[in-house]
Image (cartoon, helix red, strand yellow):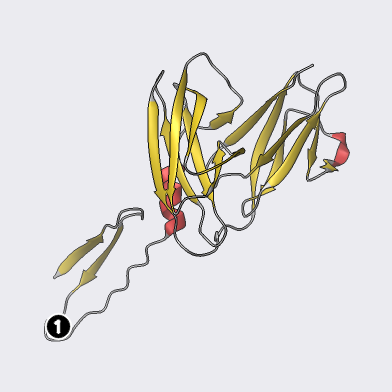
Amino acid sequence: MKYLLKINLPGFPSWEQTFILKDTTEPLEITALLDKEKAWGQELSGQPIVFGDEGKSKGRILVKSSPAGARIFLDGIYTGHRTPYLITNVPAETEHVINLVKKSFRQSFKRIQLRKDQEVTINLALTKGKSGLKGRIPVRIESDPEGAEVFVNDAPLPGEKRTPISVLLSSGKSSEIEVKLPGYRIWKKTIRPVPNVDLTIIANLQK
């Protein structure tokens, strides 16, 4: 007889396997591999994320973690704060991704959407271990006005390429990004790309 075995564990993707039980007198061993990165993929997939698209409506995100003291990245950009912290003036009516980073713990992610004047609380549990993320992820960098030069970790992009442009950033660590245009102040942020997320960063340059 054929059977279908399903396993569900909070924070992980569901797992299932079909098997045939031929001998009921002998135990049948089945190993279920629950993949955290696949869970991230399911959690984070969706509409593209844009940092720098200010909009008119605002909301707030209270970010907590267990343990506390994790660095908070909003839409790939380091906020300069650690958990617990209330992020204010977050554009509403659009989706955002929170990424928490703490030494000796795996990264944690959460995709959320705010309504106007809404305050959302998220509390993420961090697990011991390395980030587990490898390789590089494309991030699109735009500027207003366009035509700015982009530096990654103090190095200019080859070929004198200028915004708008896509760059490959490490998924396992942060990168320092500078956007420079004559007559405007330098735009500088720490960026950590998010796996499974189409991320665009808009640098609004100021005189």
Placement of the N terminus among the 4 image quadrants = bottom left
Picture residue at 65% right of the left edge, 53% below the top: 173
Report x, y in % for residue 55.
Answer: 54, 16
Q: In this view, does 50 lie to the left or right of 204?
A: left
Secondary element at image label 1: loop
Report x, y in % for residue 172.
Answer: 62, 55
Query: In front here: 156 or 83?
Result: 83
User: In the image, is residue 32 above or below residue 170?
Assistant: below
**Quadrant hosting residue 112:** top left
**Amino acid type for the residue under numbered disc 1:** Asp
User: In the image, is residue 79 above or below residue 164?
Assistant: below
Q: According to the image, label 1 marks what residue?
A: 23
Report x, y in % for residue 183.
Answer: 86, 18
Placement of the C terminus among the 4 image quadrants = top right
Q: Residue furthest toward the bottom?
A: 25
Picture residue at 65% right of the left edge, 41% below the top: 191
